[in-house]
Amino acid sequence: GGAGGAYTDVLRAGSQWDRLQALAEIKQLGGGSVAVAACAPDVVALLSDPDDKVARAACEALGSMGAVGADFADALVPLLQSGEDTRRCYAAGALGMMGTAAARHGGELAKLLTDGSASVRAAAVVAVGSVGMSDEAEGVARCMADANPAVARGAITALALLGAEGRKF
């Protein structure tokens, strides 16, 4: 059925390369496309793909869907709790891309502000700002003192995204 059906077939049974291509196209289309909305469940299924490239592309595609993707944001929570730094980064980035539509997961993102991995902290701090978690402004502000410059820069960006609450710091 239509473009959504073509994506669904590739996402379910295509080669790794074909799945990566389809996910890249879905990311480009974003959330305004009927085809994208139709294949969102198949994108979600690839979040746990054993291939890291496919899982990352699925996170980026889901994040690019905005509010459509946010309907499936619960599927990102297990990745936020993954033992793999890269998976936690991808999931935090995807939630951040969804913006305020993913605000219900702000608490899970805030837990990552003290993650052992600097790349996870950097992704999480920007995502906390992007989803509008103004009640986490103090935790975000603490990240400005992070030893890792990417985390500190991310905190400044996040505070700007938090508006009035962020300006207190």
Image (cartoon, rainbow, N blue to C red):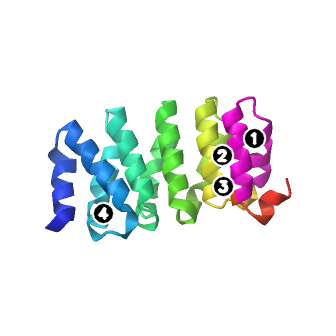
Asked if residue 62 lies left or right of residue 119, the reply is left
State yes or no: residue 56 in magenta.
no
Q: Is residue 148 above or below residue 132?
A: above
Task: Determine the secondary structure under disc 1.
Answer: helix
Residue 90 numbered mark, or none? none
Q: Earlier in the sequence, mark 3 or mark 4?
A: 4
Instruction: Work out whether residue 149 or residue 133 is closer to the camera in this orientation and state it.
Output: 149
What percent of the width, then of the height, locates residue 144?
78, 41
**Mark 3 to mark 1 CA distance (whole Å):** 12 Å
Counting labels gives 4
**Mark 2 to mark 3 CA distance (whole Å):** 7 Å
Asked if residue 53 lies left or right of residue 123, the reply is left
Task: Determine the secondary structure under disc 2.
Answer: helix
Amino acid type indicated by mark 1: Cys
Given contact means CB atoms under 8 Å apart, are the residues at marks 2 and 1 in contact?
A: yes
State yes or no: residue 151 in magenta.
yes
Task: Return the residue at label 1.
Answer: 143
Q: Is residue 86 above or below residue 132?
A: above
Task: Return the residue at label 3.
Answer: 129
**Mark 2 to mark 1 CA distance (whole Å):** 8 Å
Q: From which residue to which does the magenta span run?
A: 136-160
Amino acid type indicated by mark 2: Val
Amino acid type indicated by mark 4: Val
Q: Earlier in the sequence, mark 4 or mark 2?
A: 4
